[in-house]
Amino acid sequence: MNAIMEIITETKTRSAWSAGVKEYAMELLEDVSADDLGAANTRDKLERLLLNGAPSWKEYSWGGCSLIYDGDIARRLCAPWELRKTDNGRKNPNAREQWLDTQARALYQAFLLVLHAAL
């Protein structure tokens, strides 16, 4: 567990998005025991473990398992210019998504970061 967290911590970030994904990855690991993490030795098992009962990352996000306020999600994932463009999360991030959908994408990428560090 410590080795995985160390790998994630040492991962370089070059954008607000990647820094937010890294923060989500660390949060996903907070609620997992080292024994459970050790038993999750395949991609599917690890994803099920991190999803904590949710059927998908979209359901995880929309179900309130992570951040629930648009402004909080925007502050985590956006650069300052993007925050201005979206009025600090009051406007949708793009024409196709709401903030919880954007968070679901970030959570999936956070899962991939944990997967890369764990396997």
Image (tube, rainbow, N blue to C red):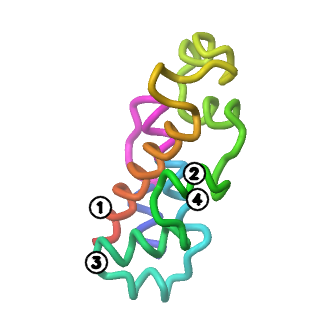
Find residue 48 and report its horizontal and vertical position in percent: 43, 73
How many numbered marks does the figure carry? 4
- Name the residue that disc number 1 marks: 116
Q: CA distance from mark 2 to mark 1?
A: 21 Å
Check disc 3 and give the amino acid type: Thr
Check disc 2 and give the amino acid type: Ser
Front of the two marks 3 and 4: 3
Front of the two marks 3 and 2: 2
N-term mark: 3 or 2? 3
Front of the two marks 3 and 1: 3
Front of the two marks 2 and 4: 2
Checking the image for residue 27, the label placed there is: 4
Asked if disc 2 and disc 1 are in contact, CB closer than 8 Å, the reply is no
Q: Quadrant of residue 28?
A: bottom right
Checking the image for residue 68, the label placed there is: none
Residue at the location (31% across, 82% down)?
Answer: 41
N-term mark: 2 or 4? 4
Which of the pair 47/53 is nearer the observer? 53
Q: CA distance from mark 1 to mark 4?
A: 16 Å
Q: CA distance from mark 3 to mark 4?
A: 20 Å
Q: Quadrant of the C terminus?
A: bottom left
Asked if disc 3 and disc 4 are in contact, CB closer than 8 Å, the reply is no
Checking the image for residue 42, the label placed there is: 3
Q: Quadrant of residue 37?
A: bottom left
